[in-house]
Image (tube, rainbow, N blue to C red):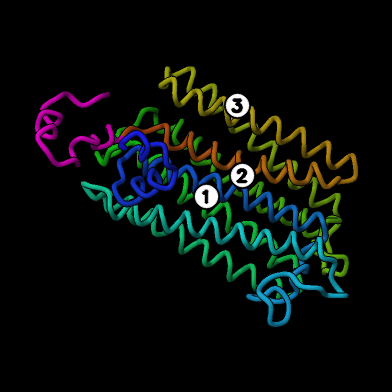
Amino acid sequence: MAERESSNPLIRTWNAVWRPTPGSLRLLALLGVIGNVVIVVSGGAVRVTKSGLGCPDWPRCSGDSLVPTHDPEHHVLNMSIEFGNRLITFVVLGVGILVFVAALRLRPRRRSLVWWALAQPMSVVAQAVIGGIVVLTKLHPAAVSLHFLVSPALLVFCVALWVRAGEGDAPPRPLAGPWTRRLAAALLVSCAAVMVAGTVVTGTGPHAGDAESRRYGFDITDVARIHGELAWLTIALTVLALAALHRTGAPAAARRRARELAGLIVLQGAVGYTQYFLGVPAGLVLLHMLGSVLMWIAAFRLFFALRDRGPAPGRAAAEPGPAAPRAAEAPQPA
């Protein structure tokens, strides 16, 4: 019976939420990270397929219907793509609620994790409201930009919870010098600036989300150049961070995070220049959006890898029964 229960995904999910361990909470947090990456790509698919007004109303899809219906002014495929993106938002909201419940149920309860977890469903609700504003303003480029930028902001909470669930609550102990930590913080600012500039390029370029949507009145060459210069600044900061980490003998995990970020930035730059010279094909736009959020996640993982907060509270410490005291007397893993 126990083996049957352990193989049942519904029971495993129930246990992960209602009787969570630091490991299961971290897994749920990772699902939150993945869900928000998926919603960025699905939102990009809405834009490049001109499905932004596939569901012309909000919160309903069309008229009095919550789901796509026959509409002579909107193709059924566009309606389905836009409605699918809305459904993914509800899935991500559901994961956020599960993460929050698991953080509340974790024993011993860690207040910082509860706040990080609460931010996830609240941010998804904000994302849904902004999505409604995007529809009601007929895809105004400023609203579309804000709609995208909420996702990287939400990923801050998701990645922070993912990392914090796997470590303790001791005061942060620096694993690198002040100069290196400032470089990591500057990288976060630079990555954020690249994404903001990227939304301006998007709002100026050809993929508006709908054939009749407004665009920014900027010259696409100028805004693409600014976006590219910020990307080169990010590359320079990453090279400096890599050099500082290797020169000072930083922990292997921190150096690995920096190499991952460098690799993603190089690939992201290659995709960006390729799509620019090829006339911004839809497939490369989606790949570039995926790369932007992966780069953002990697930058935050590097930032967190430069300090140590001790091991996470042991699983056995939260479990009742005679085994708990023996586990508490055992040395904690490094």
At label 3, the amino acid type is Val
Q: Is 331 left, or right, of 60 in this rendering?
A: left
Q: Which residues are magenta?
A: 309-334
Query: Which residue is found at the position 60% from the left and 43% from the top?
Result: 190
Task: Name the residue tied to disc 3.
Answer: 239
Looking at the rendered structure, the secondary structure element under dot 1 is helix
Is the C terminus in the top left, top right, bottom left or bottom right quadrant? top left
- In this view, the residue in front, 277 or 313, is 313
User: Gap in Å between the C-alphas at discs 3 and 1?
Assistant: 24 Å
Residue 224: percent from the left, percent from the top? 80, 48
Residue 327 inside the magenta-drawn segment = yes
- Residue depicted at 85% across the width and 66% down the height: 75
Looking at the rendered structure, the kind of residue marked 1 is Leu
Name the residue that disc number 1 marks: 155
The answer to which of marks 3 and 1 sits earlier in the sequence is 1
Task: Name the residue carrying label 2.
Answer: 293
Left or right: 200, with 215 as reference point: left
Q: Are marks 2 and 1 in contact (CB under 8 Å)?
A: yes
Q: Nearer the viewer, mark 2 or mark 3?
A: 2
